[in-house]
Image (spheres, rainbow, N blue to C red):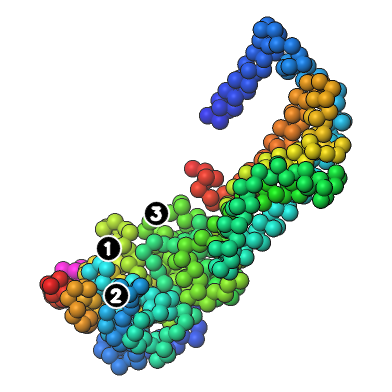
Amino acid sequence: MGSIFGALRIVLSLAAATLLWEYGAPLVGIPSYVLPVPSVIAAKFWATRMVQLSHIMDTATTTLLGLALALVVGVFLALAVVYFKTLRALMVPMLAAFNSIPKIAIAPLLVIWFGLEMESKVVMAFLLAMFPIFVNSVTGLGEIEPDIIDLSRLSGGTPWRIFTHVRLYHAAPYLTDALKIAFPLALVGSVVGEFIGGNRGVGYLVLSGQLQIDTPLVFATLLSITILATLGSGAIELFERFFLSWRPSMRTQ
Amino acid sequence: MRAQANLSLSLPLEGRAAVCPAHSSPKGASAVAPLAVNVEHLTKAFRGKTALSDISFKARQNQFVSIVGPSGCGKSTVLKMIAGLIEPTSGSLTVDGQRVQAPLRNASMVFQAPVLMPWRTVLGNVLFCIQMRGDSAASYREQALELIKLAGLAGFENHYPHQLSGGMQQRVSICRALLVRPALLLMDEPFGALDVLTRERMGFELQKLWSLERYTALFVTHSITEAVLLSDSIVVMPGMVGRMPAVTIEIDLPRPRLAGIMKDPRFVELAALVREQIEAGWVE
């Protein structure tokens, strides 16, 4: 009952905002090339739906590839840090320093190194997504309550058994949280890569809309990006609901 | 005693025949049982600060030994050293005649907090140490369920820890410790976080579960009543200031000890004796 009412409230307030935008913007004299009204954006989105779909598929591909790469490398580096304590003092400050470089500033360099095709976008997505995954994996895999480790060792637990029965499970919620941050970041990476060069992806589509001062196209493409972002975070949430129902935030009364 | 025998029948034994004689033997037999734990002049310093100085005591096989003493006297440190989890600075320490050099492989520990894994159900948590040992959980399922039932947790097998009360969680952790049939059962203030009423009941429950197989048990506690109720002997550790030696008090109350025993004159007398020893350590 409460959730139905809550959903209704969201729909109503969204509808109110859309109506205000639709009729308010022309009323105060904002021209369509500055801020197109929702009906114009929707029409443009529908008219360009096949183009949108083909470009968003490219962006989705580079985003997911970058994210997958970030997951593999991030977890691998975290394992190295967790199991080799001396590496920790060396690697954590180094990675933190690297992370403080604004990666968008090195995007042109990536084009020189990896070309204008998919590769440079995947690398950009990877660079943005890797750090949060690394940091969360270090905590999730490493910061196990000492009592649990003691208990495991006293019954003859080997490091491998402790890894598969304790560390992995303990890390799962941390990794899901990392993905919630890393997925949008990887998407940003892909789109920025597409801004810099190439003729594929929603970043390119936004840019071509800008060059033709086709503001409705820009907005329609933003709608596509929003849909992709929502699908991604929805998938993560679904995973959480099915496999991590034990974590405090997922418990139902 | 008869009730005890019934309980042990419902939990099939395998290869623990050595436990049985002590089980049915009259009191006094434990005096000739071989040494399980021998602690001699044990000292531990952390970064130059003494946490424990010159402690000696013994525990015989199938005995329940409590360690009491003021807070900060190093009770938990002793327990962890016996488990081989931390190294003593000096002194000697043997478990079953062997010098302890690495973490024991067949001991189990119950901590003050239940230390349950939130991603495992009650049954899964009870089976945890079995899996750590490398045995298949499936072959211990029946025994685990039996133990869960004996601990009064029937019907909660598939619940997650957060759905249980503190007392129930601690019972799960005791079941987990017992399922591996440990050569040495170490308990570090297991009821310290519970309210007084739950705590008293848990004392009796622990006695019941322990009586099934009488694992050699070391039990750290703050509660004198609890120590007298459960133990065959009590080691009173001195405070850091007094520098007195640890004193062992034998508890010769017959088992099983039922609820009324706390009013028994002998019980009261022994409790007073333990208190006297603790208070002797207070004087500077």
Residues at circles 2 and 1 in contact by the CB criterion of under 8 Å: no
Lower sequence index among marks 2 and 1: 2
Quote the CA–CA distance across marks 2 and 1: 34 Å
User: What numbered label is drawn on residue B200?
Assistant: 1
Check disc 2 and report its element: helix, strand or loop: strand
The one nearer the camera, A38 or B234, is A38
The one nearer the camera, A145 or B144, is A145
User: What numbered label is drawn on residue B165?
Assistant: 3
Q: Assign the magenta stretch its main secondary structure.
A: helix
The one nearer the camera, A38 or B118, is A38
Quarter of the picture containing the N terminus of chain B is: bottom left
Residue B72 in picture, x, y percent from top left: 27, 68
Q: Is residue A121 above or below residue B189?
A: above
Q: Amino acid at mark 3?
A: Ser
Judge depth for marks 3 and 2 and give the one in front: 2
Residue B117 in picture, x, y percent from top left: 50, 60
Q: Amino acid at mark 2?
A: Thr
User: What numbered label is drawn on residue B151?
Assistant: none
User: Is residue B261 on the magenta stretch?
Assistant: yes
The one nearer the camera, B63 or A122, is A122
Query: Do discs 2 and 1 belong to a common subunit?
Result: yes
Query: Mark 1 — on which chain does it sit?
Result: B
Q: At x 50% / y 86%, what residue is drawn? A: B15
Is residue A226 visible to the viewer in this orientation of the structure?
yes
Quarter of the picture containing the C terminus of chain B is: bottom left
Quote the CA–CA distance across marks 3 and 2: 37 Å
Q: Amino acid at mark 1?
A: Glu
Q: Which residues are magenta?
A: B260-264
Judge depth for marks 2 and 1 and give the one in front: 2
Query: Do discs 3 and 2 belong to a common subunit?
Result: yes
